Image (tube, grey):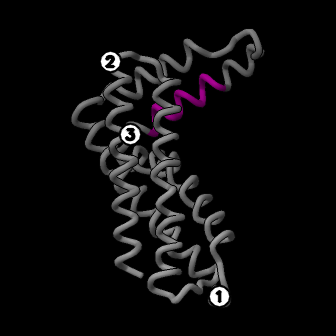
Amino acid sequence: MKKTVLTYGLIAGAIVTVFMIYGTWSLYSNPNYKTSEILGYTGMLVAFAFVFIGIKSYRDKQNEGIITFGKALQVGALIAFIASCIYVGVWLIEYYCFFPDFMEKYAKYAIDNMDTTKLSAIEIQIKTNEIKEYQEIYKSPIGVILLTFVEILPLGLIVALISSLILKRKVKAA
């Protein structure tokens, strides 16, 4: 199981890293946060396809075609966790070494691009305060790590859960 988890976790981590680096570079070349966000989440979904592939590989190659829901979820969650750790690590390098002004620029963009036609003054103030809270959290490396994990890991766990439901098999296929 270790080899499967590590192999597919590293592949997923490499894929999400490539998407992240390209997305961040393109963001600073053309500051369109929406496009960068879409690119980022697309990269996560492409990378997390390897959660499914990893569970299937473990079931078919190391477990004789049989896997319980719990074991499949364990394999998938570990793959997602490895990919997420790589994502967080690369983001820390990008953020602290290349884009230390990211949160200030993003906060300004988010506040300036709020749809004020659909929000009341109170809702605008609440959203502005939330953005400012995120800025405060980002002042700490632990805060950056936690917020970055929250960005990616839940999606990986959802993919692991769905994949486990699809791939569980109690008896060997004929």
Compare marks 1 and 3 and give the one earlier in the sequence: 3
Mark 2 crowdedness (10 Å alpha carbons): few <14, some 14-19, many ≥20: few
Estimate the spatial distance between the alpha carbons at disc 1 and disc 2, rounded to whole Å. Answer: 54 Å
**The C terminus lies in which quarter of the figure?**
bottom right
Q: Type of residue at label 1?
A: Ala
- List x then y, in percent, for residue 34: 53, 24
Query: Mark 1 against mark 2, which lies toward the viewer?
Result: 1
Estimate the spatial distance between the alpha carbons at disc 2 and disc 3, rounded to whole Å. Answer: 15 Å
Q: Main secondary structure of the magenta part?
A: helix
Residue of label 3: 19
- List x then y, in percent, for residue 62: 45, 85
Q: Type of residue at label 3?
A: Phe
Estimate the spatial distance between the alpha carbons at disc 1 and disc 3, rounded to whole Å. Answer: 39 Å
Of residue 58 and residue 84, the one placed in the foreground of this image is: 58
Mark 2 lies on a secondary structure that is helix
Residue at figure coordinates x 59%, y 84% from the top left: 67
Whether the residues at callouts 2 and 3 have beta carbons within 8 Å, the answer is: no
Range of the magenta residues?
A: 127-137
Mark 1 crowdedness (10 Å alpha carbons): few <14, some 14-19, many ≥20: few
Residue of label 2: 29
For residue 138, above or below residue 25 = below
- Is residue 52 one of those drawn in magenta? no
Q: Which mark is residue 48?
A: none
